[in-house]
Amino acid sequence: MKATKIILWLLGALFGLLALVVIYLLVAFDPNDYRQRIGEMVQEKTGLQLEIKGPMSWSLFPQFAITLEDVQAGYPDRPTVATLQHASVAMDVPALISGRLSLSGLMVDGLVLDLNRDKTGANNWDRPSAASSPAARSTAEPGSQPASSASRSMALAIDDIDLQNVQVNYHDLQANQNIALGPVNLRASAIRLGQAFPLTLTLPLSVQADGKQAIQLGNKLQASMLLDPERQLYQLHDMDLLSTIDGVTRQSLLLEIKGDVDADMQQQQVRLPNLKLALNGMQGQLDATVKDLQKAPALQGSLQIAELNLRKWLSDIGMSVSLPDEKALTAASMTTALMVDRQQLSLTNLTARLDESKISGSFQQPLNKGQTEFKLGIDQLNLDRYVASSATPATKLEASSSTTAAATAKTTSDAGYSKAPMLPVEALQGLNLRGSVQLGKLTYQQVAMSQVKFNVAAAAGKLVVDQASAQIAEGKVVLKAQVDAQKAPLRNQLQFNVDHLALEQVQTLLGSTQPAVNGIGSMSGSLSMSGNSVFDWVNSLNGSAKANVTDGRLNNINLTQQICEGIAFANQETLTAAADSEHTRLTNASLQAQFNNGVAHIDSAQGQLVGASAKGSGQINLPQRQLDMGVGVTIEGDTSREACTINPKFQGLEWPLRCQGSLDGDPAKWCRPDKEGFAKTLTSLASNEAKRKAQKELNRALDKQSDKLSEKLGGDNAEAVKGLLQGLFKK
């Protein structure tokens, strides 16, 4: 019993002595006396000038704790890199001695990192002359060993981490770029390696480049985090990431991501299983894996976008939508396989829906310089729902033709052709793509097309549309087009072959409300032009073309009626009735034209009319919008149903017409009888008629005289003489 009392007394004395030592240390040892020495040691090891301006405090019981205030660091003769308002840490010393890092609390408030790069490229965070510093030499000394596996696997236990108002500012004068991260706030508790713990993080980000409006992201993360260095597993479960994005669209974007993130560093992969995505009401799902994290990280998986009202969604984010059809863009969805690596973004097995259209194909977009590739198939597309019908030059000119007479006699400079740029030159010069498109059905300006397909390629300022074909207007169109935007002016080429087209539908497609020609047409040609406006193209049009029309009709022009009027005028007669038709029916017609700076020179134009034929030549001046053609019509049969009944004696003769005037004028006024030509034809006809009558009288006289002579001569001699006379004078 006495021994027990002695032991207890000794233990009491020992603890009392220990308490006296602790009290002495707390009273006699002031860490503020070592602030300068701490700064010298940091500079010696790292080159950083560390200045602790605020008070330092520490405690040993019940835990070892230290507090710092008002600290700044930076390299000599450079802007300050970091400042700190307050930091404190409290740790369990016995646990540390036993190989466990156990912190009851870690708090950092007001940490600011200012990273600056000047116009020369110099920065304030790289260590100057690192190779000659003592710390650099010490790290290169032989015999230094890496951290032991024991230190790497030290157990970690932190009851509470609280980071507040942490800011990272990056200013790059060389790249004219500013990035601000923060203020960052992080809160986590009950942190144990290998066990899940709650985490809350706010991470605002602002990026500004070239003086443009800054893009701002406000990020807030809540999740259950697991850190397991021993198994190299890192996980975020029940993650809820909410980001607000400003500066991209007129309205703020709200992105929300929910799900799990599992990183396995042994397998070098990160799993993103069924992440739920939402962007301002657009719902999606991502199921993907990121593999080969260290060498060549690549994401592979699938992405789904649920059906949404795209029109309303665009309006909600501040993008104005004005479409001809109010129901357009009201149903859109997409599903695709996704692959992203350092080189490109790839969408394969793509299926999408846009209203009634179903889209399938693939898309590859390089993330650095490279060629965009795509292949799309669309079952049906009605462009009239999405593209407003714009007035083409033909439409504008038709509208102007009814205004004033002066409007139909425009000069080249104001002939109604737009000088507005038609193609985005800068965009063309930067295009680098290759792809193909196939459409089962396509509707544009109420013209239905089917089996539409084309290939497109663009590189180095050249755009080529090749192997383009479509079933249109009951026929087929095949064409190839090229635009060269390497230098001004643009150079354009077009090759086309058209077979069995309904011409009135084609003219409607081109914007004409009053087709000039009806019928079934076939055309081919090779044309070139320069410039970037309709005005430029018309005035620089060169090349050749040929066309053929069957079962056709020239609208508002009755060539046979013009012949009837011309003959009546020449005979000083009046037509008893007007023609039943204002048009000219063509059973067959063809022409060939050579274009020279917009002027079509027609050397051969032929047509078979009802009861007549026609041929002509001349020119159509597109820049001046003037027509000047000479047409010869030959009456070959009955024309009573087309215009009037023409005396058979006028058949077989070529009756000349002069067709000239403005292309904007009334086609019924284009063609008129060529009075001089008609006069020559009638003169020739009168001369021939006089000769015919004279010959008839001569024949009658010869017959009479031959009969008298036969009576006088009698016998065979009389018949011989009679035959000789008739052979000499009769015709």
Image (cartoon, helix red, strand yellow):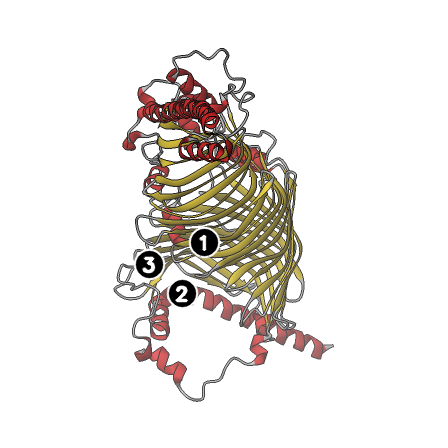
Q: Earlier in the sequence, mark 1 or mark 3?
A: 3
Per the image, label 3 sits on a secondary structure element best described as strand
Q: Amino acid at mark 2?
A: Asp
Q: Secondary structure at mark 1?
A: strand
| Circle 1 residue | 464
Q: Secondary structure at mark 2?
A: loop
User: What x and y, as percent, mark residue 496?
Assistant: 48, 48
First in sequence: mark 1 or mark 2? 2
453 horizontally vs 204: left or right: right
Mark 1–mark 3 Cα distance, whole angstroms, equals 47 Å
- Residue at left 28%, top 32%? 413
- Give neighbour class at mark 3: few <14, some 14-19, many 20+ (Cα, 10 Å): many
The extreme right residue here reads 1
On the image, numbered disc 3 is attached to which residue? 116
* Residue sitting nearer the eye, 328 or 194: 328
Instruction: Give the mark, 3 or 2, whose residue is nearer the N terminus.
Output: 2
452 above or below 504? Answer: below
Residue 26 on image: x %, y %: 46, 65
674 with respect to 267 (left or right): left
State the image quarter where residue 30 is shown: bottom left
Q: Is residue 279 above or below residue 163?
A: above
